[in-house]
Amino acid sequence: MKYFNAIKWEMILDTKEYLQYRIGLFMDFLVFTGTFLAVYFMGSTQGFVSFYNTSEAGGYILVLIGYIFWQNASAALGYCVGTVSDETSHGIFEIRLQSKFHMEGILFIKLVISCLIHLVTYVGIIIFGNAVVGYSSNDLKIIILAIFVSLFSLVGMYGIGLIFGSICICEKKVGSLILVVQTMLLFVTNAISPSRASVIYLIPFTSGIDIVRDIYLGNKVSNYLILVYVIVNILWAIAGTVCFRFALRYEKRYGAFDNY
Amino acid sequence: MIEVKNVNKFYKNKQVLFDFSVTIDLTKDGIYGLLGPNGAGKTTFLKVLTGLLDYSSGTMRVREEDNYMKWCKENIVLIPAGERGIRYKNTVYDNIMFFAAMKGSKEKEVKNLIEKYANELHFSQFLKRRVETLSTGEKKKAMLLCGLCTDMKVLIMDEPSNGLDIESQVEMKNLIKDLAKTYHKTFIISSHDLEFLNELVEHYIFIFKGKNGGEEDRAMGTEEIREIYLEKRRGMDNNEVF
């Protein structure tokens, strides 16, 4: 009960804080919409048209599916690192350390709230897509499905975020490393270019992309793919939690949370 | 009773606490003052006491409790120095609820405490204001209120007089005295400001270069504290020379 109370007040304060940072939310909207426009005009759809033997409109939806997953993953990564870095510099982290509740669970809930608020950034992409390609009702269902299925990849991306958050705890800043990783995730995975290379399935959201694409194309979704999606995410979450707890212990023993 | 015995603390390769021992009696509602120069280890000690930092060796325990870390999370709150540890974009009320929720306090009880302490601190009219709109003194009061509404037995305040004008310092002193007496709270205040500590603190702990430089169990005026402080400091320096 007390834990739910802590989560409740996190949600209230985070939501109120987000509404204060309206410009930030608007900038996120512009950045993500702008990135998608760039991806679209790069001609990424052509690769999907030939790989999946589908139409131009179909190719667009397949790119959009990948982009939705990437956007959520990217936001999760940036949020984890940004929160740890920001809260450490403002002393909120020290308040959390005085709490009787484990931080990781609360940070995950904060991440989910943030991603739900950021759903508004999809509006630009969907409006653009409808203007350029036009959606059928099936397309809209797939877009909504992609958004929901991608939420599970937050588990794994949160884990990766905690790993970078661990670096933040010890080193205070990670510089542009996150931006580099986010960009790499866009280009080396199957987000905007088709790929079935095995190694990419080690990344939390890639198998989710294939699941939704298979549903859209009317293919049978492999149970193995679903299993990979679930297991990879859980393993990254565990790895991230272990790293984060290790970093916390190390910093408590040898460092100071307020030295910048 | 909190018993700290021979606690040593390192930051990487630099030792900051050296065999630090002290006993803090929680049965008497008291105001403890941790007095020392800049870099003496006051903040480090307070963070070790609160469980924010781990010590390298030594022991810390509370009588009749097996697990100090668990006990300190349920009974101690640290109000940090400066204007850190508070969410600027949220209101004072929201911050209080957040603090208290983090500490596991029940919402209904917290709301009662807010009413009680906000009246005590003459701060009710500020509850709905965002922290970023408050002055330095008002922010300090907001942070004190956050700490009080967690209903912890021990409140630790790190340099609470920093940045306050004279009137605000006097007001803060009087508040702390009243709160300790009326609500049976133990305050541990770290400061290098003798003017602030005089006639407020009842138990002085002197800290020099990470070592316990001695204790005095009585309230004192500024001049007396200064003399004792300098005497103890000279004593510590002489011990180092020999």
Image: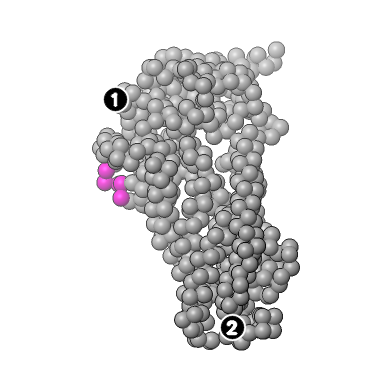
Specify the amino acid type for callout 2.
Gly
Residue B111, percent from left and from top: 29, 41
Residue named by callout 1: B182
Considering depth in this image, is A165 or B39 the residue closer to the camera? A165
| Same chain? Circles 2 and 1 | no
Can residue B230 be seen from the camera position used here? Answer: no
Assess disc 2: are there few (<14), some (14-19) or many (≥20) residues with their C-alpha within 10 Å of its C-alpha.
some
Give B239 or A97, whichever is nearer the viewer: A97
Rendered view: A226 above or below B69: below
Pointer 2 chain:
A
x, y percent for residue B127: 31, 46
Residue A174 among those drawn in magenta: no
Frontmost residue, B76 versus B13? B76
Segment colored magenta:
B124-128
| Marks 2,1: beta carbons within 8 A | no
State the scheme by which the image is colored: one colour
Label 2, on which residue? A58
